[in-house]
Image (cartoon, helix red, strand yellow):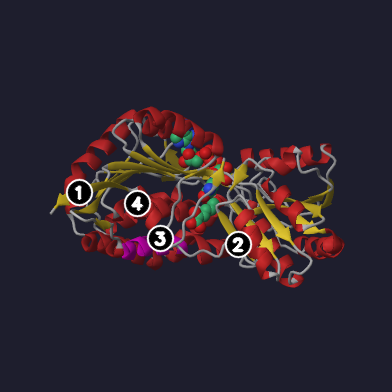
Amino acid sequence: MEMIANYINGELKPPHSADYLDDVNPATAETFAKIPLSDEEDLKSAIASAEKAFPDWSGLSAKERANYLMKISNLIKDNLEELALAESIDTGKPIQLAKTVDIPRAASNMEFFAHAITQFSSESHAGKDSINYTLRKPIGVVACISPWNLPLYLFTWKIAPALASGNCVIAKPSEITPYTAYLFSKICIEAGLPKGVLNILHGTGPEIGNAIVQNKKVKAISFTGGTATGRKIAEISAPMFRKVSLELGGKNPALVFADCNLDKTVEGLVRASFTNQGEICLCASRIYIEESIYDDFKTRFVEKVKALTVGNPSNQNTNMGALVSAQHLEKVKSYIALAKEEGGKLLCGEEAIELDEHTTKNGYFLRPHVFENLSNHCRTNQEEIFGPVVSLNIFKNENEATSLANESEYGLASTIWTNNLPRAHRIGNQIETGIVWINCWMNRDLRTPFGGMKNSGLGREGGLEALRFFTEPKNICIQF
Ligand SMILES: NC(=O)c1ccc[n+]([C@@H]2O[C@H](COP(=O)([O-])OP(=O)(O)OC[C@H]3O[C@@H](n4cnc5c(N)ncnc54)[C@H](O)[C@@H]3O)[C@@H](O)[C@H]2O)c1
Ligand SMILES: O=C/C=C/C=C(\O)C(=O)O
């Protein structure tokens, strides 16, 4: 059995506690690796090594740091097959998805910020008797904490800008899916990343995650995960006046107008609802459809959803694999029961799942569920489920559609499906989400600001926003 190791001061190390947690394959419910349960002692070593590495790392030129990131990016590409297989085994996601989305995006994250840092500039302000210019200095030791749904994708999305801008990093992947972060630490060693620049600590949120957040030597935290965890991190960080970037949950509305291209919309929304088993913070979960096309949309949507293949993640044709854990499966199932109690009518979801010799009946599989007839205020339509469950809802006109979409404590992403361009712009302007996709979903340009409003988070990642987050501006004024 593979024993995952921490990555501290450039070396792979067992945890100080010598305790481990099981790493489980969701398609079989079998343990395939052991996860270190790190503690304060591991954190102390990691912080000491990061502090020691900081003067040299921040003293390199942007180009020199970029070269390391490029080496890492290339090694991710060279190891695509191994990384994709590991990601699929750890998360239950289809291997095809890991091969075409997760791992290529991890390589792109490293490459993007390698380029971005060489193009990063700061402002100058010329006045009548003076000129001001702004320096952007790295902050020091910073932390990156990421979730289980897109493990290497979201881990590198934070680490890349933090390192590119000259910080040294303590990174913690999710204890539910730590394996590709472990492979990533081996890649960093192979790339010759100077020791201490990046330290990866494995373990649970309440233990090592909380220890990282409590530590005053950690000067900034970039976090992606649940809203409740984000709130805790904000509460602990506020008295320290520490910078935090929080990418949290979503309950993302999709607005379907009668003037949309129905074929493309149905196809797009099946993808938006059920990619990665619906375990993406950006997945559509509340679909609002204009009354006149409701029946037509429903028939076509349900037909396509029923045709999705659920099962063995290593089969090339699988559309949906297993949910990430037994606990998460139970949570999603409890929402399905709740939807029924709240008056929801189930349109599909209870068909049999065909398993083969690579999966077992113990695997955490669930077919995609589609409900209708739920009120906008019920818990099913308000709380984040983070699984393969969507609701179909009716609206009568544009104003009602926007109001229904905005009646939510979340504000991450929305999609609008229409061929009426002025309407698309109008709603895009009014809808309360940080990201609006029109006639598409998850079309990502890494230069754009990425993040949510309301309880979906604080701050933005992506492009220059991430480089600004990981640097401290200092203004220098010179009088003529
Ligand atoms: N907005 C986004 O970009 C985005 C992206 C992916 C996932 N998410 C959200 O993440 C959630 C699912 O992920 P999850 O269940 O892994 O979330 P989570 O909040 O339980 O865990 C996220 C990370 O935080 C750590 N953690 C947990 N408790 C902690 C604590 N007290 N102190 C410090 N660290 C702690 C975990 O170990 C993990 O590494 C969903 O709500 C989803 O919407 C948001
Ligand atoms: O589950 C959350 C997905 C987050 C996606 C990104 O952060 C991204 O595409 O940059």
Q: Residue at x 55, y 38 (%)?
A: 227
* Quadrant occupied by the C terminus: bottom left
Residue contact between numbered discs 4 and 3, judged by CB atoms under 8 Å: no
Residue contact between numbered discs 2 and 4, judged by CB atoms under 8 Å: no
From the image, tell me which residue sits under label 2.
437
Amino acid type at mark 2 = Trp
Q: Is mark 4 within 8 Å of ligand 2?
A: no
Dot 2 or dot 4: first in sequence order is: 2
From the image, tell me which residue sits under label 1.
476
Q: Residue at x 33, y 50 (%)?
A: 162
Rendering quarter of residue 254: bottom right
| Label 1: element kind | strand
| Location of residue 73 with respect to 404 vertically, above or below | below
Q: Residue at x 43, y 51 (%)?
A: 155
Using residue 160 as the reference point, say whether residue 133 is left or right of it. left
Rendering quarter of residue 214: top left
| Location of residue 319 with respect to 176 vertically, above or below | below
From the image, tell me which residue sits under label 3.
109
273 inside magenta stretch: no
The residue segment tinted magenta is 105-116
Dot 4 or dot 3: first in sequence order is: 3
From the image, tell me which residue sits under label 4.
468
Q: Position of residue 74 (x, y in %)?
A: 34, 67
Dot 3 or dot 1: first in sequence order is: 3
| Label 3: element kind | helix
